[in-house]
Image (cartoon, grey):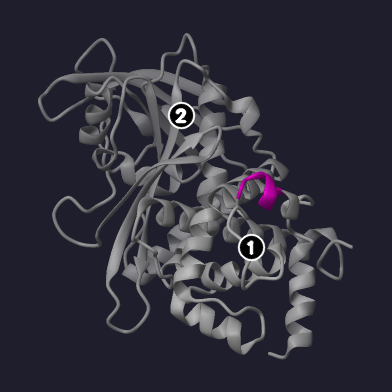
């Protein structure tokens, strides 16, 4: 691609950035190091995005930047620049999330520390590159990555589990269906924390609160046949040591458009496996079903669903990023590098979402003037 096309694409991409993105570089201390080989913050961003968005290694990134006339920098210097940019990328992510209607300022709870947990696979460049599983926890409302851990992709104690994360009193761990296990929820409870997870109906069995009788989850959710109607039930589940964990099921029916998307995905996956969908699976796909141990006196059903919506907005970005991250080279020399890389990836994902949204909706030419 020639320089004219590169500059045109860059100019379009800049329209997706927060308006004060250059100022934020200075305000967050990202330019505390002398620019040296970079002319300005724009060249810094363009070079970093080569690494973050394209999945190039640091060495390949600096080579491409030099050949394109973008910058003359070593791979070591670029890594240090990435480390300095952690707060910059984090602040940019918060700005873009706010544009999506996820206002973290309104999500603050002083008595409970909300933490989103997730995991993704990272593959180092090359045919024989090692594969790692990245486990990370993001603190709400400030999007601070407060825990970051690398494990092998396969093997004992490497899978996605709430047990991968340290939990302290008052933490509320928000996870998707991969974290919907009784042993994980029990681990959080034993550390005086709370859980809020999307229910995996094949992994969790619930019982009536005041009797050891199984709770009929399917029959209960089928009571909700209209959109925008929420309902909750007090239930309990059994941990490995036979102790009971009390909590609530919070349920809302999806919109018809969301149901159609979910069913289409299920049918596609069943076709790949050459299997038949169970009727219960089809019905469960029409609902968002959450289990939480948060106290009902402090958190209503709608608040529980709203907290999961915050997580979902961020998860959508990482879902799109997982294919990109699989190509990326994780700078795993230290925690600062890893966190900066993670925030940079999140920024790339948010930009991607915004570009797609703008191309489809905002204008016939596909970007803001």
Residue 247 quadrant: top left
Residue 215 quadrant: top left
- Range of magenta residues: 24-29
Residue at (23%, 33%) from the top-left corner?
182
Image spot of residue 127 (x, y percent): 31, 84
Residue 246 vs 290, above or below: the answer is above
Quadrant of image for the N terminus: bottom right
Is 110 one of the magenta-colored residues?
no
Image spot of residue 266 (x, y percent): 44, 58
Q: Which mark is residue 352?
A: 1
Depth order, front residue of 173/198:
173
Residue at (27%, 72%) from the top-left corner?
130
Query: Is residue 227 in view?
Result: no
Is 27 one of the magenta-colored residues?
yes
Residue sticking out furthest to the right: 369
**Dot 2: within a 10 Å radius of its alpha carbon, few (fewer than 14), some, or many (20 or more) residues?**
many
Residue sticking out furthest to the left: 241
Residue at (25%, 32%) from the top-left corner?
205
**Dot 1: within a 10 Å radius of its alpha carbon, few (fewer than 14), some, or many (20 or more) residues?**
some
Residue 76 vs 17, above or below: the answer is below
Q: Is 13 positioned to the left or the right of 46 in the image?
A: right
Image spot of residue 167 (x, y percent): 30, 30
Quadrant of image for the C terminus: bottom right
Residue 163 vs 282, above or below: the answer is above
Residue at (51%, 22%) from the top-left corner?
231
- Element on which disc 1 rests: helix
Image spot of residue 71 (x, y percent): 63, 78
Depth order, front residue of 235/91:
91
Depth order, front residue of 252/299:
299
Q: Which mark is residue 114?
A: 2
Residue 137 quadrant: top left
**Quick one: label 1 or label 2, which is nearer the N terminus?**
2
């Amino acid at each position: 691609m020639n320089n004219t096309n590169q500059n045109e694409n860059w100019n379009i991409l800049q329209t997706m950035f927060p308006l004060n993105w250059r100022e934020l570089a200075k305000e967050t201390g990202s330019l505390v190091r002398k620019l040296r080989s970079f002319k300005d913050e724009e060249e810094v961003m363009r070079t970093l995005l080569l690494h973050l968005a394209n999945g190039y290694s640091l060495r390949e990134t600096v080579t491409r930047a030099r050949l394109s006339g973008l910058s003359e920098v070593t791979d070591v210097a670029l890594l240090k620049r990435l480390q300095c940019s952690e707060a910059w990328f984090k602040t940019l992510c918060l700005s873009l999330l706010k544009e999506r209607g996820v206002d973290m300022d309104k999500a603050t709870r002083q008595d409970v520390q909300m933490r989103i947990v997730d995991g993704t696979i990272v593959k180092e460049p090359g045919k024989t590159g090692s594969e790692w599983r990245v486990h990370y926890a993001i603190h709400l409302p400030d999007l601070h990555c407060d825990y970051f851990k690398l494990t092998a992709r396969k093997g004992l104690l490497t899978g996605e589990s709430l047990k991968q994360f340290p939990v302290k009193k008052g933490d509320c761990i928000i996870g998707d269906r991969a974290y919907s296990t009784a042993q994980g929820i029990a681990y959080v409870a034993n550390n005086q924390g709370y859980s809020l997870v999307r229910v995996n109906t094949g992994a969790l069995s619930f019982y009536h609160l005041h009797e050891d009788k199984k709770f009929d989850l399917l029959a209960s959710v089928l009571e909700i046949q209209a959109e925008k109607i929420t309902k909750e039930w007090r239930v309990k589940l059994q941990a490995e040591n036979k102790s009971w964990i009390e909590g609530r099921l919070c349920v809302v029916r999806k919109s018809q458009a969301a149901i159609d998307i979910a069913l289409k995905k299920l049918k596609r996956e069943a076709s790949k496996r050459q299997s038949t969908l169970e009727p219960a699976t089809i019905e469960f796909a029409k609902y968002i079903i959450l289990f939480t141990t948060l106290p009902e006196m402090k958190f209503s059903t709608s608040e529980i669903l709203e907290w999961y919506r915050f997580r979902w907005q961020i998860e959508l970005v990482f879902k799109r990023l997982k294919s990109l991250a699989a190509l990326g080279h994780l700078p795993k020399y230290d925690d600062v590098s890893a966190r900066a890389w993670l925030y940079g990836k999140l920024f790339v994902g948010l930009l991607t979402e915004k570009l797609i949204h703008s191309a489809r909706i905002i204008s016939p030419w596909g970007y803001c003037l």
